Amino acid sequence: MRATSRLTGAAKKTVERLLVSAGTACLAYHDKIMRNLPCKVLQVDEVWSFTRCKQANVPEHLKGAKEIGDTWTWIGLDPQSKLVASYHVGKREYADAYTFIHDLASRLANRVQLTSDGHTPYLQAVEDAFGAEIDYSMLIKLYGKPIGDETRYSPPVCIGARKRRIIGQPDTDLVSTSHVERQNLTVRMSARRFTRLTNAFSKKLENHKHQVSLHFMHYNFCRIHQSLRVTPAMEAGISDHVWTLEELADLIP
């Protein structure tokens, strides 16, 4: 926000108020338009960030607070249209999995095949939201131990993966989380607050949520996907043109 303030000459408080207005408008539009989606395959995952300070640095008197420390953005992606159908910002706990999966289920028009990683809260959340009306698998990745201190900020080496059928009859050829994991990279490259090892992290959870809403609105409606040559919203049939930034700004009341 400081960079935006310097570039535009607007006060930082003005930029912050605009972020709140834009984020609120984008969330409301997403909630309205993302209904009866024709998705057939979905992948879900969570991308990590932190708010105010890292979890290890949370002051003793604030431990357990939902507004600071580790912050996870849950993402539901259609790998065919690349549409982000649903997202949720919170912790990586069952309550958040429940909220996210139920929101995702409420936006679908038909039965889908769903793949998640091996995060345990998905099991109960998916069953509660869909019952038996879904084809659901987990892709459980197996990791080796990192070697040496130079890999401190790198993930462990993936040495294999196991596909586990949970509900229904999922097509094993479609059991994958590759597209939603690539979406995690898109988030990190496009949203400054997700950049690692910088001072760009969110100071307030509320502002973090608004920024996430603004990012996914731009991703779905304004950004032409390199392989599709159209926006994800156009590919999914919920928009007939590439949105301009002016159109996005017009959502603000």
Image (spheres, rainbow, N blue to C red):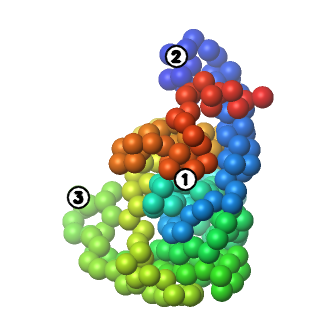
Q: Earlier in the sequence, mark 2 or mark 1?
A: 2
Task: Give the structural element (helix, strand or loop) at label 1.
Answer: loop
User: Which amino acid, mark 3?
Assistant: Glu
Q: Residue furthest top?
A: 9
With respect to residue 185, does 99 lie above or below?
Answer: below
Are the two marked residues, 2 and 1, in contact with CB atoms closer than 8 angstroms?
no
The crowding category of the residue bearing disc 2, from other C-alpha atoms within 10 Å (few below 14, some 14 to 19, many at least 20), is: few
Drawn side of residue 237 relative to residue 174, left or right: right
Indicate which label's residue lies in the foreground, 3 or 2. 2
Which residue is rendered at x = 49% and y = 74% of the image?
A: 115
User: Which amino acid, mark 1?
Assistant: Ala
Drawn side of residue 74 relative to residue 143, left or right: right
With respect to residue 68, does 42 lie above or below?
Answer: below
- How far, Cα to Cα, is label 1 from label 3? 42 Å
- How far, Cα to Cα, is label 3 from label 2? 36 Å
| Quarter occupied by residue 75 | bottom right
- How far, Cα to Cα, is label 2 from label 1? 38 Å
Location of mark 2 (residue): 6
Front in this rendered view, residue 177 or 151: 177
Which residue is rendered at x = 26% and y = 61% of the image?
A: 151
Task: Give the structural element (helix, strand or loop) at label 3.
Answer: helix
Location of mark 1 (residue): 236
| Quarter occupied by residue 178 | bottom left
Location of mark 3 (residue): 150
Q: Earlier in the sequence, mark 3 or mark 2?
A: 2
Provide residue 212's location: percent of width, then percent of height.
59, 45
Provide residue 124's location: percent of width, then percent of height.
65, 82
User: Which amino acid, mark 2?
Assistant: Arg
With respect to residue 147, does 207 lie above or below?
Answer: above
The crowding category of the residue bearing disc 3, from other C-alpha atoms within 10 Å (few below 14, some 14 to 19, many at least 20), is: few
Task: Give the structural element (helix, strand or loop) at label 2.
Answer: helix
